[in-house]
Amino acid sequence: MRLLPEMPAAKDAHEGGGAYAGQPRLADIAFIRPVALCEYSDLRHLHASAMRAAAARDLAGDGTVLSDALSGGISAYIYGVGYLERLTSVMLFGAWIDTLLVASCSWRTDPFDPRVGIIDDLFVSPLFDRAGLGDRLLTHVENHAGERGVERYVVEATGSARHFLARAGYGDSGIYRTVVEDEATPLRMFRFEKATPASVAVSAAGASQ
């Protein structure tokens, strides 16, 4: 059930939608804050539903439907102990509309290079897709990481986020990892990268000297 009237669809699956005259966008009224440990049950429900929707979008391009095996594999992955342990090791932010958690995004420092911030868990509830929530959360997390010395961002996301991340300035590195094994349709997370504006400016200044 939607808490607010449905917004008009945008041109892209991840693009912020328009609003009715005089009505704010959902992304503008969402409240962003860190996710508390007691909210991880809602968080994992959000991740499972969003990951299934993303997998279904990826498969639809090949004329394939989401299989029961892959759907079950996603649930096993999200609700596994390892996934929970990983969530407790990152800085997690969520976006709420009223009391409903509708989107999330996290980041952590690369253990091999403190100048690199690894951004993950960028999920938006399928019910609130196309509302600009992904854009706002990604910007929030980038700013949070940049203020702590990060010079380059790395995002892990499903293939369906490729166009969204390209608009945000990310390039596809061509690297991926399989997170859910399935003989016919494995679920893969792809790696996208971009430099912070400050590091780009420093590199340009160094090259001109």
Image: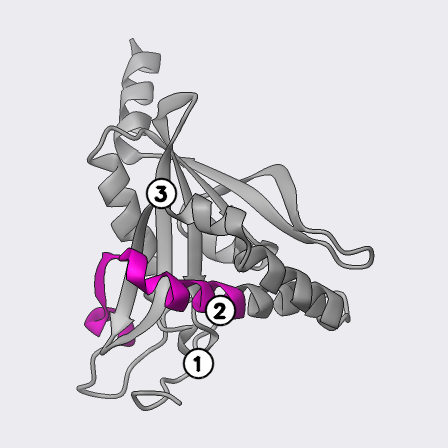
- Label 1 and label 2: CA atoms lie apart by 8 Å
User: Which residue matches tag 2?
Assistant: 12
- Label 1 and label 3: CA atoms lie apart by 33 Å
User: Which residue matches tag 3?
Assistant: 90
Q: Are marks 1 and 3 in contact (CB under 8 Å)?
A: no
Question: Where 43 sits versus 5, above or below?
Answer: above
Magenta-drawn stretch contains 37: yes
Q: Secondary structure at mark 2?
A: loop
Badge 3 amino acid: Val
Question: Where 91 sits versus 53, above or below?
Answer: above
3 or 2: mark nearer the eye: 3
1 or 3: mark nearer the eye: 3
Mark yes or no: residue 136 visible.
Answer: no
Label 2 Cα crowd, 10 Å radius (few <14 / some 14-19 / many 20+): few
User: Which residue matches tag 1?
Assistant: 9
- x and y, in percent, of residue 68 in the image: 73, 72
Q: Give me the residue at 36% from left, 65% from top.
A: 103
Earlier in the chain: of badge 3 and badge 2, it is 2
Q: Which residues are magenta?
A: 25-50
